[in-house]
Image: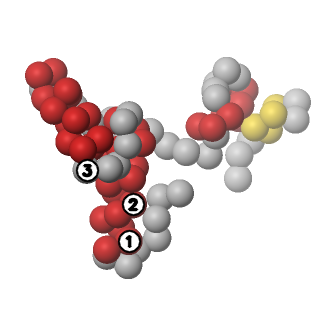
Amino acid sequence: MEASFSGQSMTASFYPNQQTSRQGKAAITIFVKPESKAAIRAALADGGYGTSYQEGIVNLLNELLNKQNRQSLL
């Protein structure tokens, strides 16, 4: 349950410009060596997971979760 100020949730009042697609989601940040970024993106794309980091990682994790009979991320 979130606090409400003038009809807005507390989150909305602190982050008024948050993208609609990000509402109700949490961020996960990973750090890699700068020179490995291109190889990671290529591996995700070549593996059929997607061409962006976010899409590729989410699809890769969903595949892993499905193999483990766990609930998918989406």
Label 3 residue SS: loop
Q: Is residue 1 visible?
A: yes
Q: Secondary structure at mark 1?
A: helix
Q: Which amino acid type corresponds to the residue marked 2 in the rendered image?
A: Asn
For the residues bearing labels 2 and 1, Cβ distance under 8 angstroms = yes
Q: Is residue 60 above or below residue 31?
A: below
| Other-residue count near label 1 (Cα within 10 Å), few / some / many at <14 / 14–19 / ≥20 | few
In percent of the image, x 72 and y 26: which residue is there?
13
The local crowd at label 3, few if under 14, some if 14 to 19, many if 20 or more residues have their Cα within 10 Å, is few
Q: Which mark is residue 62?
A: 2
Residue 32 seen: no
Label 2 packing within 10 angstroms: few (<14), some (14-19), many (20+) = some
Comparing 26 with 37, the one in front is 37
The amino acid beneath tag 1 is: Asn
Instruction: Answer above or below: position of 34 versus 47.
Output: above
Of labels 2 and 3, earlier in sequence is 3
**Badge 2 vs badge 3, beta-carbon distance below 8 Å:** no
Which residue in the structure is indicated by mark 3?
47
Q: Earlier in the sequence, mark 3 or mark 1?
A: 3
Residue depicted at 68% across the width and 34% down the height: 20
Tell me the SS state at disc 2: helix
Q: How many marks?
A: 3
The amino acid type of the residue labelled 3 equals Gly
Residue at 15%, 21% (x, y): give it: 34
Q: Which mark is residue 66?
A: 1
Q: Could you tell me residue 16's position as x and y percent?
A: 70, 23
